[in-house]
Amino acid sequence: MKQIFETFNYQALLEVIEEQQGKKFMIQNADLFYLWYCVQRKMVNENRQVMIKYLRENQILDDSRKILKTVDRYFRFRSTFPDLNESQQRRLDRNNKYLNPVIPFQKIGNRMLGIIDSNKESYSVVDISEARENTVAVLFKKGGISWRNNNLHPFEMKWILEHNKKDLTKKIGVLQ
C-alpha cells in the first residue's frame, strides 16, 4: 500500500515538471526522475548496483540497456538534482497517513472522521470536515481514549468507541 501512495506522490512530481519544463522534457526524463524520487524517499540506496537491482527486480524498466543507461544518467546529473529536505520528507510522510488511514474517512453526522496512525503509542481520530485537520480523540495503542473535543455528538463518540474495539483490536490488540 505504501508503494501505491509513493507512486501517487511521484505522479504529482511529474505533473509539476511537465508544467514547468513541458511534456516532452518530462517524458524523456521520467525514468531519471523516478530513480531520483526513490533515492530521496529512501526506497533505494544511492549505489549503482543496488539501483540496477531495484529497477530490474521491481520491473520498473524491462530492458537491461535502458536500466544501465538510466543509472548512468542519474549519476551524471545527480549534482543538478535538488535534495528533499527534512520538512518536505515529513510532509510527504504525513500526506501518506491521510491517503492511507488506519480507518478510512467517512461521513459521521456533520463530521468527516477517520483514524490515522500518529506515532508508536497512539492513533488519532481526525475530523477533516472543515478542510483542516482537527483531532477529536486519541486512541492509545496500549488501551484507552483521550477525548480532545467536548462537542462530539453521541453517535460520533459511539463510532469512535466501536472502531477502537473492533477494527483497531485486529490491528494492534487494543482492548477497551
Image: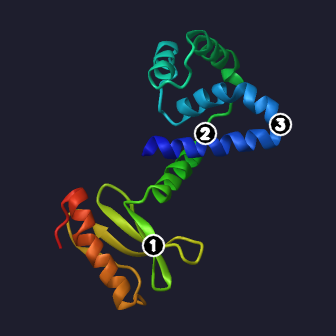
As displayed, is residue 139 above or below residue 85?
A: below
**In x, y percent, where is residue 57?**
44, 21
Which quadrant of the figure contains the C terminus? bottom left
User: Mark 2 or mark 1: which comes first in sequence?
Assistant: 2
- Kind of residue at badge 1: Gln
User: Mark 3 or mark 1: which comes first in sequence?
Assistant: 3
Q: Helix, strand, or loop for circle 3?
A: loop
The residue indicated by pointer 1 is: 106
Q: Are the two marked residues, 3 and 2, in contact with CB atoms closer than 8 angstroms?
A: no
Q: Helix, strand, or loop for circle 1?
A: strand
As displayed, is residue 86 above or below residue 165?
A: above
Can you tell which of label 3 and label 2 is closer to the viewer?
3
Q: Are the two marked residues, 3 and 1, in contact with CB atoms closer than 8 angstroms?
A: no
**In x, y percent, where is residue 9?**
59, 45
User: Mark 3 or mark 2: which comes first in sequence?
Assistant: 3
Please give left or right for residue 20 compared with residue 161 in the image.
Answer: right
- Residue at 52%, 73% in the rendered image: 128
Are there few (<14), some (14-19), or many (20+) residues within 10 Å of tag 1? Answer: some
- Kind of residue at badge 3: Gly
Are there few (<14), some (14-19), or many (20+) residues within 10 Å of tag 3? Answer: few
**Disc 3 to disc 2, how far (Cα)?**
22 Å
Q: Helix, strand, or loop for circle 2?
A: loop
Q: Nearer the viewer, residue 75 or 3?
A: 3
As displayed, is residue 127 above or below residue 32?
A: below
**Disc 2 to disc 1, how far (Cα)?**
32 Å
Residue 22: mark in rendering: 3
Can you tell which of label 2 and label 1 is closer to the viewer?
1
- Kind of residue at badge 2: Leu
As displayed, is residue 124 above or below residue 119?
A: below
- Residue at 51%, 47% in the rendered image: 5
The residue indicated by pointer 2 is: 84
